[in-house]
Amino acid sequence: MNTSFMRTLIATSLALAPLAASAQRSIEDIFGDLSGFLNIIITFLILLATVLFLWGIVKYITAGGDEEKTKEARGMIIWGIVFLAIMVAVWGFVNVLLEFILETDSSTPTPIPEGPQQE
């Protein structure tokens, strides 16, 4: 076998080892933890995009008519808006996906199929 494939396989198995250790947890607990982690990351990235946007505005105001600085500031403002739009869309997608998977708003959850019956 290819050594890089083996290294990747070993690294992946080591990364997934904590999931195997938490096999006693319910899927709702796992997705709840994942949701909390993703909300923290997305909030941080939205904060960074907002700072980029505001920094672009400050640079635009302080450019003093210099065409090069104005162009650079305008680019920062545009990228800040783009990143904000992307992060809000990702945040919405994650919440819709988690609600679909966990069915938190449903009054009748989808039943889990039963396995083979032993007599």
Image: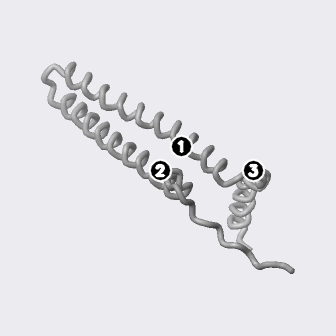
Left or right: 2 in relation to 82? right
| Nearer to me, 27 or 91 | 27
Which sits earlier in the primary sequence, circle 1 or circle 2?
1
Q: Position of residue 63 (x, y in %)?
A: 20, 22
| Nearer to me, 62 or 95 | 95
Crowding at dot 2, Cα within 10 Å, few <14 / some 14-19 / many 20+, comes out as some
Relative vertical location of residue 48 with respect to residue 4 in this rendering, above or below: above
- The residue indicated by pointer 2 is 94
Relative vertical location of residue 51 with respect to residue 75 in this rendering, above or below: above
Left or right: 27 in relation to 21? left
Look at the numbered discs 1 and 2 and tell me whether their residues touch, using CB distance below 8 Å. Answer: yes
Look at the numbered discs 3 and 2 and tell me whether their residues touch, using CB distance below 8 Å. Answer: no
Which image quarter is the C terminus in? bottom right
Tag 2 secondary structure: helix
Spatial CA span between label 1 and label 3: 18 Å
| Nearer to me, 45 or 52 | 45
- Amino acid type, label 1: Leu
In the image, what residue occupies the spot 58% across and 41% down?
Answer: 37
Spatial CA span between label 3 and label 2: 22 Å
Spatial CA span between label 1 and label 2: 8 Å
Q: Position of residue 28 (x, y in %)?
A: 64, 51
Relative vertical location of residue 48 with respect to residue 102 in this rendering, above or below: above
Q: Position of residue 31 (x, y in %)?
A: 61, 50
Q: Find residue 5 and report its image quarter.
A: bottom right
In the image, what residue occupies the spot 60% across and 45% down?
Answer: 32
- The residue indicated by pointer 3 is 18
Q: Position of residue 75 (x, y in %)?
A: 25, 37
Q: Residue furthest left?
A: 65
The mark closer to the camera, 3 or 2, is: 2
Q: How many marks?
A: 3
Tag 3 secondary structure: helix
- The residue indicated by pointer 1 is 38
